[in-house]
Image (cartoon, helix red, strand yellow):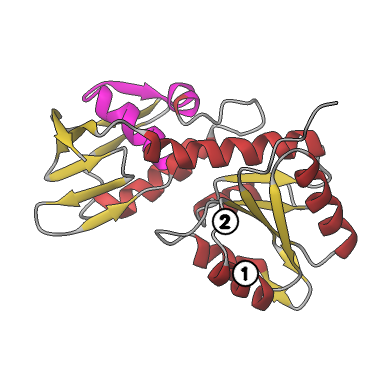
């Protein structure tokens, strides 16, 4: 007789369909993920204040509530990563979700097994920076000091930018290859969204979000330059140093 492993992470399921929510919570718990559910924004916010979640699974259609409101709140620094679930699967809908800061976008109907793998992937990518060794490399580029492990950068003028794991994946690749044109498929693979279901436009969304955070004028970017028809290039020198955490 084997003993079930205790749940190691906590997931919040925000869905106004009680049958679907119960099914997800039950499935997650069977596969060693603890889970709580909320049917509306008020309940979700109350749980988020009371408990520490490792990920949020957010249905955008919540009856009288709009899931986009919670998505915007979860996109702030310090919030748990979130995955959007929606019956709307067009490229435009996915891009909007990713631009809001979602770490993944899952179209209904979905496979429970695939969804579980995606949730695990988001949790793993979010926790990885916390598991780094105390000594880590910090990049200096364009007036910014970038600490990839901390998902953060600080400008010499005092500005601070925080990043999602997906944004850091793109930024890490660009910093590692300054002045080199990085093809979209290369950057896509380096964001760890290379599962065949996420499209190359994901890279464009992540670059747009990075520019909003680190460019002086995102509409006229000087650091991350677009190379039409190919990809992106970090147009700046990069120096690295080892620092103590």
* Mark 2: secondary structure: loop
- In the picture shown, does residue 116 fall above or below 196? below
Q: Position of residue 27 (x, y in %)?
A: 82, 44
Closest to the observer, 95 or 48: 48
Return the residue at label 1: 47
Which residue: 75% across, 69% down? 62
Mark 1 closeness class: few <14, some 14–19, many ≥20 residues within 10 Å = some
In this orientation, does residue 218 appear?
A: no
On-image quarter of the C terminus: top left
Closest to the observer, 183 or 157: 157
Q: How many marks?
A: 2
Closest to the observer, 221 or 192: 192
Magenta-colored span = 167-189
Which residue: 53% across, 51% down? 81
Q: Are marks 2 and 1 in contact (CB under 8 Å)?
A: yes
Return the residue at label 2: 53
- In the picture shown, does residue 122 fall above or below 55? above
- In the picture shown, does residue 211 fall above or below 45? above
* Mark 1: secondary structure: helix
């Amino acid at each position: 007789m084997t003993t079930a492993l205790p749940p190691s992470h906590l997931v919040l399921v925000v869905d106004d369909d009680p049958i679907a929510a119960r099914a997800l919570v039950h499935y997650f718990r069977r596969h060693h993920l603890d889970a709580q559910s909320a049917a509306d924004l008020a309940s979700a916010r109350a749980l988020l204040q009371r408990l520490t979640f490792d990920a949020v699974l957010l249905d955008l259609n919540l009856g009288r509530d709009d899931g986009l409101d919670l998505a915007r709140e979860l996109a702030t620094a310090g919030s748990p990563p979130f995955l959007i679930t929606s019956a709307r699967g067009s490229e435009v809908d996915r891009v909007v979700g990713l631009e809001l800061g979602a770490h993944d976008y899952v179209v209904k109907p979905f496979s429970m097994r695939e969804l579980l793998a995606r949730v695990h992937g988001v949790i793993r990518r979010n926790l990885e920076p916390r598991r780094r060794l105390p000594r880590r490399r910090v990049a200096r580029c364009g007036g910014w000091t970038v600490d990839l492990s901390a998902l953060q950068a600080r400008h010499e003028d005092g500005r601070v930018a925080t990043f999602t794991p997906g944004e850091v994946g793109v930024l890490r690749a660009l910093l590692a290859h300054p002045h080199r044109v990085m093809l979209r498929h290369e950057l896509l693979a380096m964001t760890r969204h290379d599962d065949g279901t996420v499209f190359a436009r994901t890279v464009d969304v992540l670059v747009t979000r990075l520019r909003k955070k680190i460019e002086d004028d995102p509409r006229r970017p000087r650091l991350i330059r677009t190379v039409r028809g190919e990809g992106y290039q970090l147009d700046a020198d990069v120096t690295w140093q080892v620092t103590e955490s």
